Image: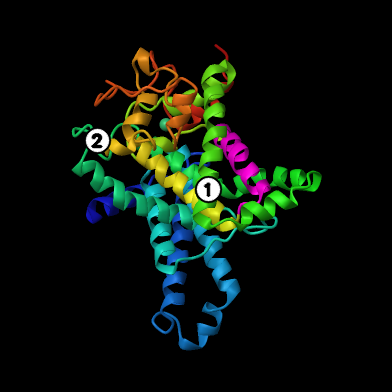
Amino acid sequence: MIGYVRRRLRAELELPRDQRRFGTGWIAGTGGLAAAVAGLAFVVSAKFPGLFLTPELAVVTQSAWFRFVIMGLLVFGFACATLSMVLRPNKTLGLVTVAIVLAASLLGAVRMDPVGTPGVGIFFGLDFFILNLVFLGFIFIPLERLVPHRPEQTVFRTEWREDLFYYLISSMMVQVLSYLTLAPSGAILAQADLAATRSFLGGLPLVVQIILIMLLTDFVQYWLHRAFHRVPALWRFHAVHHSAQTMDWIAGARMHFLEVIVLRAVTATPMFVLGFTEVALQAYILIVYVYSSILHANIRVEPKWITPFLATPRFHHWHHGIEKEAIDVNFAIHFPIYDRLFGTHHMPEDEWPSGYGIGGHPVPKGYWQQFLYPFRRG
Ligand SMILES: [Zn+2]
Ligand SMILES: [Zn+2]
């Protein structure tokens, strides 16, 4: 394995000059790799002072600005790797760089606190998402082997790279998203007098707050989701999420960038305005990430007693089903009760859909093709 990666990496690095042109992703790939290697080396030296650097330099390596430099190198490496993977058919450089950034983040637990976020640090940084991916991978990859709905499906199924790329992009964009979401919150707070509501909700026990947030956001999400299905212009965006023909823990990450922004703004902004505490909102975001992986996962287990109360993989797989009866059903992502209330519930006993996707598969493959898809005519 290591030998194979090393050979491929070497072949990439030693490409003939005419294949390294600007725009091929080679410069971004090698630049990112260099930054990531430097970042990792600094993490190691900061972590173990005296091992690689002279003890006198510990003053430097323990300082705040040194951490800032490491952070910068790793973020730069990650950004370059992403760019390289977009531009280059050969993903070796990008993947090796991401692996190094990951290793450095895990080793140094480098905190990437949102810099310059107005007011609060609701949103997690890059390392949170990388750790999240690793953490979820440790849970879901074995689970999908142990109790699969489709045993023949592998981890590296068709389009796994595309869906992983969706995951990486959303991690990269989290800072931008936090700005986009918090800006309207500030404006609303300046307008409305919500002091009483805010102090009441913010004073509730944490668990109650989290359940309330889940109930409220799922109600809003239900109708927004339904609109994304019913309004043709919105459907073209949401169709990207439904274009997945394989369901597993990573498939849910496939979502058009604009839909992510709208969803985030429409669900998170009111919760922030209403005065739920930062901890409760953070916990909710964590729950949404884990829950989304569960819903899309290739897992067949489903405790019978839980299905009336909570959405399960089979419940959401029906939402993605290819057959006619699966069109426009099961919009809720936490509580099936909303689908029962509004007449869109579909859960035939012990049955699964025969396949996933949209009839005729109109959405093209690949991240950028899918990004442009809603804007194209026809
Ligand atoms: Zn949908
Ligand atoms: Zn889905």
Query: Quick check: 267 above or below 53?
Result: above
Instruction: Say left or right for 287 vs 141.
Output: right
Instruction: Say left or right for 12 vs 172.
Output: left
Q: CA distance from mark 2 to mark 1?
A: 32 Å
Nearest the viewer among 209 and 66 is 209
Q: Quadrant of ligand 2?
A: top left
Q: Which residue is mark 2?
A: 300
Nearest the viewer among 20 and 205 is 205
Secondary structure type for disc 2: loop
Q: Mark 2 vs mark 1: which is more N-terminal?
A: 1
The colour style of the image is rainbow
Nearest the viewer among 240 and 354 is 354
Instruction: Say left or right for 177 vs 16.
Output: right
Few, some or many C-alpha atoms within 10 Å of disc 2 (few <14, some 14-19, many ≥20)? some
Q: Which residues are magenta?
A: 258-276
Asked if one can make out residue 99 in the rendered structure from this viewpoint, the answer is yes
Nearest the viewer among 196 and 50 is 196
Secondary structure type for disc 1: helix
Q: Whole-percent x and y of residue 291?
A: 41, 43
Question: Could you say which quadrant of the image residue 231 lies in?
Answer: top right
Q: Whole-percent x and y of residue 69?
A: 56, 67
Q: Amino acid at mark 1?
A: Met
At horizontal 40% and vertical 46% (from top left) the residue drawn is 290
Q: Which mark is residue 210?
A: none
Q: Whole-percent x and y of residue 97?
A: 41, 54
Q: Which residue is mark 1?
A: 172
Asked if one can make out residue 26 in the rendered structure from this viewpoint, the answer is no
Q: Amino acid at mark 2?
A: Arg
Is residue 219 in the magenta section?
no
At horizontal 56% and vertical 45% (from top left) the residue drawn is 173
